[in-house]
Amino acid sequence: MRTGRSSLGGKIPQSCGSRMNTHKTFVDLSTELLQDGQSIRFCAHGMSMKPTILHGDFVTVEPIEPSEIRRGDIVLYRGRNNVIAHRVVGLTASKRFLFCGDGRETADQPVRPDQILGRVVALERDGRLLRLHHHWMQVLYVARFYLSRFRGRLMQWLRKSGS
């Protein structure tokens, strides 16, 4: 197992052996650190953000004020018993955020601003660091978004025309 240094100077594990995003201690500690202005880094689990974030990628999250969040940002928010990193796709009339995983078709339940913990700013995959707030990453997101919608509509059309 690889180890690294936390912002507090201690060693932290850098393997993806356990599903920590639903572990109460991880949820509480992540919330506390981000609310105190610290960045966190953890291993992503699941495929809801594929292809942007893959199972096993290391995700770096920095604190953010809800007023600074923009459509297209990937944001970590606190769910009922877990933390979730999904992309911002909109804002409701009641000022709640709408999120959706890149690999999903439907949005999550609306999220209150007080549930926002931080913004995903970087990924580490296969030893390479990918910063998410470069201009080319935003262009890539927009292209993927429209291509996935086009693919979905094309598949619907093909199913209809084939029956």
Image: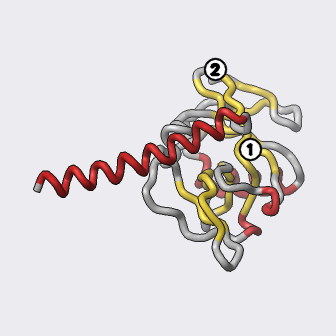
Q: Secondary structure at mark 1?
A: strand
Q: Quadrant of residue 157?
A: bottom left
Compared to residue 45, the image places residue 106 above or below, namely below
Callout 1, which amino acid? Val
Looking at the image, tell me whether mark 1 or mark 2 is earlier in sequence order.
1
**Mark 2 closeness class: few <14, some 14–19, many ≥20 residues within 10 Å:** few
Callout 2: helix, strand or loop?
loop
The residue carrying pointer 1 sits among few (fewer than 14), some (14 to 19) or many (20 or more) residues within 10 Å by Cα, namely many
Instruction: Identify the disc placed on residue 155.
Output: none
Q: Which residue is mark 2?
A: 127
Q: Name the spot of residue 128 as percent of width and height, x first.
A: 65, 21
* Horizontal side of residue 163 vs 61, given as left or right: left
Identified by mark 2, the residue type is Gly
Q: Where residue 85 sits: x, y (%)?
A: 62, 51
* Residue 35 left/right relative to 55: right
- Residue, disc 1: 61
> What whole-number distance in Å separates the C-alpha atoms at marks 1 and 2?
17 Å
Q: Is residue 152 left or right of residue 147?
A: left
- Circles 1 and 2 in contact, beta carbons < 8 Å: no
Can you say which quadrant of the picture contains the N terminus?
Answer: top right
